[in-house]
Image: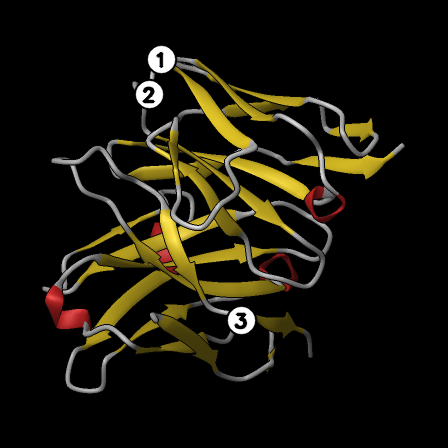
Amino acid sequence: DIQMTQSPSTLSASVGDRVTITCRASQSISSWLAWYQQKPGKAPKLLIYKASSLESGVPSRFSGSGSGTEFTLTISSLQPDDFATYYCQQYNSYWRTFGQGTKVEIK
Amino acid sequence: QVQLQESGPGLVKPSETLSLTCAVSGYSISSGYYWGWIRQPPGKGLEWIGSIYHSGSTYYNPSLKSRVTISVDTSKNQFSLKLSSVTAADTAVYYCARDTLDYGSGSCSFDYWGQGTLVTVSS
């Protein structure tokens, strides 16, 4: 099975900061990767699909990049609404796994 | 607007079978897409359980496959999850979601989610 390792697990940042979260796959997954945002008590929200495509309605300050085994989610200028937990999710051969999550906290 | 709503018992006894249903509105399941279940133990991360195509073909998380059955009822526009022989480790919020898996486009994400339902396994 493919393991997804997210880093960091917790990130402290201020409004306006540029934030980068990394997800590493244990083997190549091409561009079969998505990113989600989850707030307490709520369902995850899709942000990025196919590694770098922005989901409709998601602010353009969110961007995704990477392919193969290394992927990043970048928030260009952190806004108050962005404090949440972020998950990556991979797909390979009819198997999905999520990263362990990155909590973005207020500094 | 696509909407999904989970329903089912909030408390299940150990060794029994957990059963949940996801009602879909705003989109006909028969029109396409896979439909999936994902769970999240309290305070922990997300785990994909399995997905079903509108035709009824399924694929499951290998770690749960022996205990999971997902079915679809296109006449009621809903799909269901059964998880057998549950233990306390199966206590979680269970989400249903639309699965965009498509080899042609390279898509593999869950784009619409239900609000989630907490299922506690306890005697």
Q: Is residue A20 left or right of residue B69?
A: right
Q: Are marks 1 and 3 on the same chain?
A: no
Residue B5, located in which quarter of the rendered image? bottom left
Identify which residue is drawn at 42% across, 13% down: A69
Residue A94, located in which quarter of the rendered image? top left
Q: Nearer the viewer, mark 1 or mark 3?
A: 1
Query: Mark 3 — on which chain does it sit?
Result: B
Image coordinates of residue A4 in percent, x first then y, are 51, 25
Identify which residue is drawn at 26% across, 38% down: B107
Q: Is residue A20 left or right of residue B74?
A: right
Q: Which mark is residue A101?
A: none
| Quarter of the image with the N terminus of chain A in it | top left
Cβ–Cβ under 8 Å for marks 1 and 3: no
Query: Mark 2 — on which chain does it sit?
Result: A
Q: Are marks 2 and 3 on the same chain?
A: no
Up the image or down, A58 lies above or below A72; here it is below
Badge 3 amino acid: Ser
Up the image or down, A68 lies above or below B22; here it is above
Rounded to the nearest angstrom, the CA distance separating label 2 from label 1 is: 5 Å
Q: Secondary structure at mark 2?
A: loop
Residue A31, located in which quarter of the rendered image? top left
Cβ–Cβ under 8 Å for marks 2 and 1: yes
Cβ–Cβ under 8 Å for marks 2 and 3: no
Within 10 Å of disc 1 (Cα), the crowding (few <14, some 14-19, many 20+) is some
Q: Which residue is mark 1?
A: A68
Q: How many marks?
A: 3
